[in-house]
Image (cartoon, rainbow, N blue to C red):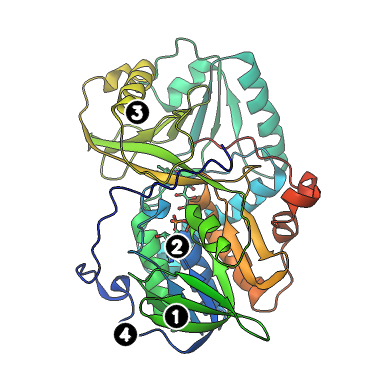
Amino acid sequence: MQGGIEDEEDESRADVSGEIRLPATLEGTAGPLPETVEIAIVGGGVIGLSIAYHLAKLGLTDVVVIERGYLAEGASGRNGGGVRQQWSTEINIRLMQESVELCRRFAVDLGVNVWFRQGGYLFLARNAKEVARLEKNIALQNRCGVATRMLEPKAALDIVPELNLTGIVGASYNPSDGILFPWPFLWGYARQAAAYGVRIFTQTPVGGLEPMAGGGYVVHTPRGAVRARRVINATGAWSPKLAELIGVQVPTWPIRHEICSSEPLKPFLRPMVSELASGLYCSQSMRGEIVGGVSLPGHGSTYGMGSTLEFLATYARRLVRLMPVLGDIKILRQWAGPYDQSPDGNPILGPAPGHPDFFLACGFVGHGFMMAPIIGKLYAEWLTGGAPHEIFGRSGLARFADGSGAQHAKEDFNIG
Ligand SMILES: Cc1cc2nc3c(=O)[nH]c(=O)nc-3n(C[C@H](O)[C@H](O)[C@H](O)COP(=O)(O)OP(=O)(O)OC[C@H]3O[C@@H](n4cnc5c(N)ncnc54)[C@H](O)[C@@H]3O)c2cc1C
């Protein structure tokens, strides 16, 4: 899959330059870019905005966020909003414990209701190998203080009575995992970052990065150029393209991930339910919709964000097998977004080797939303003079070239 990136861009990307009208900061800062800035963050998704907010909160406000389209245009505006602590490596479990805490405080700290609801995550196994995998993960999660427990199939009915247990041989459940509504999360970060003084430019694609003598880059856009001491590449699935502008190879590739949403139903489903074998996942939003997806292998590497009947048929089959009660629901919306797939399933963070002023914040696969709160906070602490958290030592781009990736255990629980 690597190296075989179709250069096809998203056919559904509308040209809305100059036409959209969004509230206050979401519309972006008007006028030309400033002449100089300490940090230019390219990409107005959840990662870029979380870093911007945390930098500003720590006092570093000489920051611009430059987004080629609108906020939430990329994966951050298209995801399922799942937030879990059920992971297979200690570092990811511990990071996600902190992220969940930040999600819990989000409404109070940032003044926006993100509809965060901790109804748990229920993973379902259909064979002994999957049960063993869950048990191994649970032992590690419990050692870290996450209260995940293994359930006999019948006990899963106490949590979701509508499940069809045929073929289910075990389940894992952690009650403090949850779901949130992604868009207000972005609005909260954007609004508060802007209130601190960060300037956010939407409809502003970065088309060139010119290294300056003495460090930093001239960042070129159709709106003008800004001289930035440091640049952060937070362009998600497009990160290889931005990095290429200065000759840096980022080994991630885009994978289209489809998802859909139903008509609203009376509330009945508290947890996110996910089936390991098929990659099926679904949850019920606070508005009552069933939001979910399923793995569709073999779609290759693409920036295309079209929707397929194949997805809908596969999802419907798997969903109705698991919860026959949903057999008659109507699907109202179907869409897709890009996973920024990294070779070991973990993000790529820190400066690119040989480019000390060009920082990477990409490769978050299907879990960047839940990681954004803690990664943004830790990144900001580091960039404002704090000691780097150990995640940065493990997540450098060099790990793929020099074998130090062995330090970063492959995360094999990239599901739901
Ligand atoms: C269908 C789906 C379901 C998902 N479900 C979950 C989930 O349940 N939980 C979870 O944690 N994660 C989930 N994810 C993953 C999550 O959405 C992503 O990991 C996360 O949003 C990545 O954020 P980002 O800021 O790195 O990228 P993005 O949100 O893609 O932001 C990158 C931004 O960079 C901009 N950009 C690109 N090139 C340029 C340029 N040259 N100049 C300026 N701007 C540029 C893009 O327009 C885009 O807005 C899901 C993803 C998808 C697609």
Q: Residue at x 23, y 63 (%)?
A: 16
- Vertical side of 95 occupied by 49: above or below: below
Secondary structure of the residue carrying numbered label 3: helix
The residue to which callout 3 is attached is: 311
Write down the residue under mark 1: 198
Density class for disc 2 (Cα within 10 Å; few <14, some 14-19, many ≥20) is: many
Instruction: Give the spatial CA distance, label 4 vs label 3.
Output: 42 Å
Say which amino acid is labelled 3: Phe
Q: Position of residue 85 (x, y in %)?
A: 58, 43
C-alpha span from label 4 to label 2: 31 Å
- Alpha carbon distance from label 1 to label 3: 40 Å
Note whether 236 is above or below 167 in the view shown: below
Three-letter residue code for mark 1:
Val
Residue beneath label 4, please?
31
Could you classify mark 4 by the number of other residues whose Cα lies within 10 Å: few (under 14), some (14-19), or many (20 or more)? few
Q: Which mark is residue 106?
A: 2
Residue nearest the viewer, comparing 101 with 11: 11
User: Which numbered circle lies on residue 176?
Assistant: none
Side (left or right) of 379 relative to 12: right
Query: If you read the primary sequence from the N terminus, does the residue marked by circle 4 or circle 3 appear first?
Result: 4
Label 2's element?
Answer: helix
Q: Are marks 3 and 2 in contact (CB under 8 Å)?
A: no
